[in-house]
Amino acid sequence: MRSRVHAVAGVLGLTLITLFLTTSVVVELVGDRATIAAAKQWILYGVAVLIPCLIVAGASGRSMMGPQPGPELRAKQRRMFVIAAVGLAVLTLCALLLQQLSAAGEFGLTFTLVQTVEFVAGAVNVTLMSLNVRAGLRLTGRIGPRMAGAARAA
């Protein structure tokens, strides 16, 4: 049961961050200011779901670790620490700032800089979370080392 909770929380977190990034890129490219402001508001609502997902994924993962975790689990744990730090300290702050700026109609340099930071931090988290999903699939035997290597080469 813990492994299912862990998997669902992790995949939901990865899906949400990917959705936030995709939404931001799309509305920046084709949306007007009102659409951008609406997207930023919805992303902020989504952060309220994302934070518990990251907490549940981290806590459930830690509860499944034994007293002597192997190198793969230690690497996964280190990535989760970075994911949580980036998610809470950077992405949450960016979501708040971007929502406030867009609601006020301020789409200048500050908005662009914060948006750039959000894109970079989001890409980092998507990458690290994807690596953790792959590691989890490997650890549970759902994919073997060759499949993980093939996925990396693709």
Image (cartoon, rainbow, N blue to C red):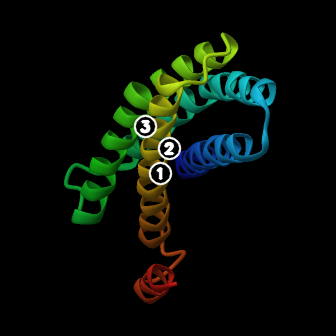
Q: Please name the residue shown 68% across and 15% down the image.
A: 105
Q: Please name the residue shown 75% across and 26% down the image.
A: 33
Q: Is residue 135 above or below residue 90?
A: below
Q: Nearer the viewer, mark 1 or mark 3?
A: 3
Considering the numbered disc 3 on the image, is that residue within a helix, a strand or a loop?
helix
**Dots 1 and 2: beta carbons under 8 Å?**
yes
Of the pair 125 and 102, the residue shown nearer to us: 102
x, y (%) of residue 37? Answer: 72, 23
Residue on which disc 2 sits: 119
CA gap between label 1 and label 3 equals 10 Å
When asked about the image quadrant of residue 127, the answer is bottom left
Mark 2 is surrounded, within 10 Å at the Cα level, by few (under 14), some (14 to 19) or many (20 or more) other residues, namely: some
**Dots 3 and 2: beta carbons under 8 Å?**
yes
Q: Please name the residue shown 60% across and 51% down the image.
A: 11
The answer to whether residue 53 is left or right of residue 82 is: right
**Dots 1 and 3: beta carbons under 8 Å?**
no
Residue on which disc 3 sits: 117
Q: Is residue 153 above or below residue 89?
A: below
Residue on which disc 1 sits: 123
x, y (%) of residue 119? Answer: 50, 44
Q: Please name the residue shown 57% across and 23% down the image.
A: 98
Residue 91, numbered circle: none
Mark 3 is surrounded, within 10 Å at the Cα level, by few (under 14), some (14 to 19) or many (20 or more) other residues, namely: some
The answer to whether residue 65 is left or right of residue 15 is: left
x, y (%) of residue 68? Answer: 19, 55
Total number of numbered labels? 3
- Residue type at mark 3 is Val
x, y (%) of residue 38? Answer: 77, 24
- Residue type at mark 1 is Ala
CA gap between label 3 and label 2 equals 5 Å
